[in-house]
Amino acid sequence: SDSIAQSESSNLDEEYDDNELLILNTPEALYKLYHKNKLQSRISSLQRIELLCPDCGQWCQTGVHSKIGLWADGHF
């Protein structure tokens, strides 16, 4: 199943540019944008990671604790 996820992940890179990934707005698309350094992040006062929404310019809280890195697959 890991090879299937990697295959789908690779297809997402090849098929869509950054603007299309923003429009898709799926966890996989946001993960790809984050890895491309296209999404800003910060740690909230509740020790959760927040992402800056490129559409509205507001910080959006995730459920991910600041001690967990967003670089690991499956955290979006």
Image (cartoon, rainbow, N blue to C red):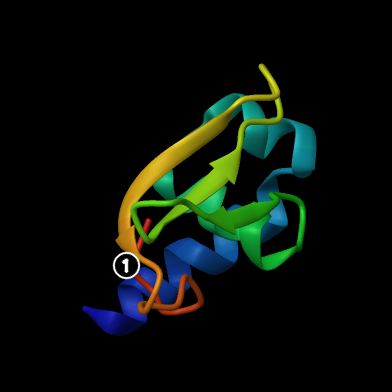
Tell me residue 21's x, y (percent).
64, 38
| Residue positioned 65% across, 32% down in the render | 22
Which residue occupies the foreground of this view, 62 or 29? 62
Secondary structure found at label 1: loop
Which residue occupies the foreground of this view, 13 or 59? 59
The residue positioned farthest toward the front in the image shown: 45
Which residue occupies the foreground of this view, 7 or 53? 53
- Image quadrant where residue 49 sits: bottom left
Q: Is residue 68 left or right of residue 23?
A: left
Which residue occupies the foreground of this view, 39 or 48? 48
Q: Quadrant of the N terminus?
A: bottom left
Amino acid type at image mark 1: Gly
Residue 43's place in the image compared with 29, above or below, is below
Tell me residue 34's x, y (percent).
63, 58
Q: Is residue 42 left or right of residue 70?
A: right
Q: Looking at the image, how many numbered discs can be counted on the residues?
A: 1
Tell me residue 59's x, y (percent).
57, 34
The residue positioned farthest toward the top in the image shown: 56
- Image quadrant where residue 11 sits: bottom right
| Residue positioned 41% across, 46% down in the render | 27
Q: Quadrant of the C terminus?
A: bottom left
Residue 62's place in the image compared with 21, above or below, is below
Q: Is residue 18 left or right of residue 28?
A: right
Q: Which residue is mark 1?
A: 74
Tell me residue 26's x, y (percent).
44, 38
Residue 61's place in the image compared with 68, above or below, is above
Q: Is residue 76 left or right of residue 43?
A: left
| Residue positioned 56% across, 45% down in the render | 51
Mark 1 residue crowding within 10 angstroms, few (<14) / some (14–19) / many (20+): few
The residue positioned farthest toward the left in the image shown: 1
